[in-house]
């Protein structure tokens, strides 16, 4: 499927646009690819509210140096600029973009290395700005967010889910773009406090981690499990069944890290403090029956998921018992998705 057909023969003009796009946390994990940036199994995520990237794009033409200039917090970043340039070149059907110069001014509301995906927020913010440019030049009026999700996916799979608010799935309706999914009103305002146990640079990137699934002895069992977990989570989100959502959430996090531990070229991103916090969360839940659950991304930091209704007691536990294990705690919640700003 190619959603870029209407944009293949455009004439470049100057244009400026600015987008704020949030990160997301996967409840059912995308871990393993097929073809070019297509997921081996469906995934499902909650879009965050406070953790976002704000990106201004200035497109110009006729400059002697077409290409990409990128400033993160006002500082020029050659490495990220080269990545975006390679991404734009990979959009072969939009070859006219080679004549365009893009200046990118970007900043995140959250620090790097905290287990909050800056690639999801950063690359979706860029893709939204690029989509805005394509829609402006072509006059196309429909499927803006679907196109933005398609372009985000080509930059980073999880970014495809950041272009919508609430809960989002990718790899069910389509492998090529994500879509928003319904949620019971009681689960529409879930909290996510991120327990940052280590801000160290990851030893294996997510992209490299996906690659380790291609020769993995448990790959097909994992993809089948993810499909089952996807359908369980969707049903539980619709029914408002938080204990079922939480059970699958934790199983997904542990399976993701089990895949790393059992890969032919094994690695782990877990730290002793991650496991200590998991033990404490399980004990807290046993003792209090309060609905506090965890998940993990490809890193050691825990996302603590709980409802607004138990927020007070759970935040007291987090700040008294779990925070001493961590470098910091970042409080976030389910958000409404990107905005043009
Ligand atoms: C563990 O989206 O970062 O966060 O497509 O190679 O850029 P690329 O990978 P990426 O992988 C995310 C993996 C994950 C799970 C998830 O967000 O679904």
Image (cartoon, rainbow, N blue to C red):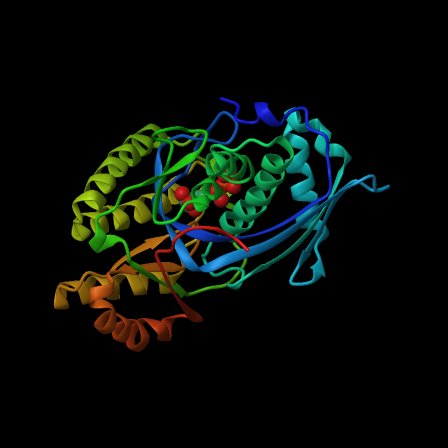
* Residue located at (31% from left, 43% from top): 255
**Percent position (x, y) of residue 186?**
20, 55
Q: Can see residue 265?
A: no
Q: Quadrant of residue 281?
A: bottom left
7 or 311: which is nearer to us? 7
Q: In the image shown, does 337 or 230 lie closer to the viewer?
A: 337
Residue 208 lies, in percent from the top left, at 52, 40
* Residue that protrudes farthest toward the right in the picture: 64
> Would you identify the image quadrant in which residue 99 lies?
top right
Left/right of residue 244 with respect to residue 335 in the rendered view: left
Q: Is residue 321 above or below residue 97?
A: below
Using the image as rendered, state which of residue 295 and residue 267 is in the foreground.
Answer: 295
Q: Residue at x 56, y 42 (%)?
A: 127
- x%, y% of residue 143? 47, 33
Q: Is residue 249 visible?
A: yes
Q: Is residue 290 above or below residue 251?
A: below
Q: Residue at x 29, y 74 (%)?
A: 321
């Amino acid at each position: 499927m190619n959603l870029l057909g209407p944009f293949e023969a455009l004439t470049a003009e100057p244009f400026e646009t600015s987008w704020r796009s949030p990160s997301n946390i996967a409840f059912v994990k995308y871990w393993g690819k097929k073809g070019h940036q297509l997921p081996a199994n469906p995934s499902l995520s909650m879009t965050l509210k406070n953790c976002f990237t704000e990106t201004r794009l200035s497109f110009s033409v006729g400059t002697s140096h077409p290409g990409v200039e990128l400033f993160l917090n006002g500082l020029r970043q050659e490495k990220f600029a080269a990545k975006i340039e390679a991404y734009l070149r990979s959009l072969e059907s939009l070859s006219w973009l080679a004549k365009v110069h893009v200046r990118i001014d970007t900043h995140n509301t959250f620090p790097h290395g905290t287990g909050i995906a800056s690639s999801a927020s950063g690359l979706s913010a860029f893709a939204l700005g690029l989509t805005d440019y394509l829609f402006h030049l072509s006059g196309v009026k429909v499927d803006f967010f679907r196109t933005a999700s398609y372009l985000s996916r080509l930059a980073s799979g999880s970014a495809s889910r950041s272009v919508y608010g609430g809960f989002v799935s990718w790899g069910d309706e389509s492998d090529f773009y994500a879509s928003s999914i319904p949620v019971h009103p009681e689960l529409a305002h879930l909290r996510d406090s991120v327990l940052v146990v280590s801000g160290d640079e990851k030893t294996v990137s997510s992209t490299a981690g996906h690659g380790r699934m291609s020769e993995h002895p448990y790959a097909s069992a994992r993809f089948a499990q993810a499909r089952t977990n996807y359908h369980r989570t969707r049903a539980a989100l619709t029914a408002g069944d938080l204990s079922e959502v939480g059970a699958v959430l934790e199983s997904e996090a542990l399976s993701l890290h089990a895949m790393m531990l059992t890969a032919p070229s094994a690695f782990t991103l877990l730290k002793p403090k991650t496991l200590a916090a998991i033990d404490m969360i399980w004990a807290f839940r046993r003792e209090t029956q309060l609905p506090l659950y965890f998940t993990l991304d490809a890193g050691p930091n825990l996302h603590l998921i709980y409802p607004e209704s138990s927020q007070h007691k759970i935040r007291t536990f987090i700040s008294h018992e779990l925070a001493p294990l961590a470098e910091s705690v970042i409080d976030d919640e389910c958000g409404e998705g990107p905005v043009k700003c």
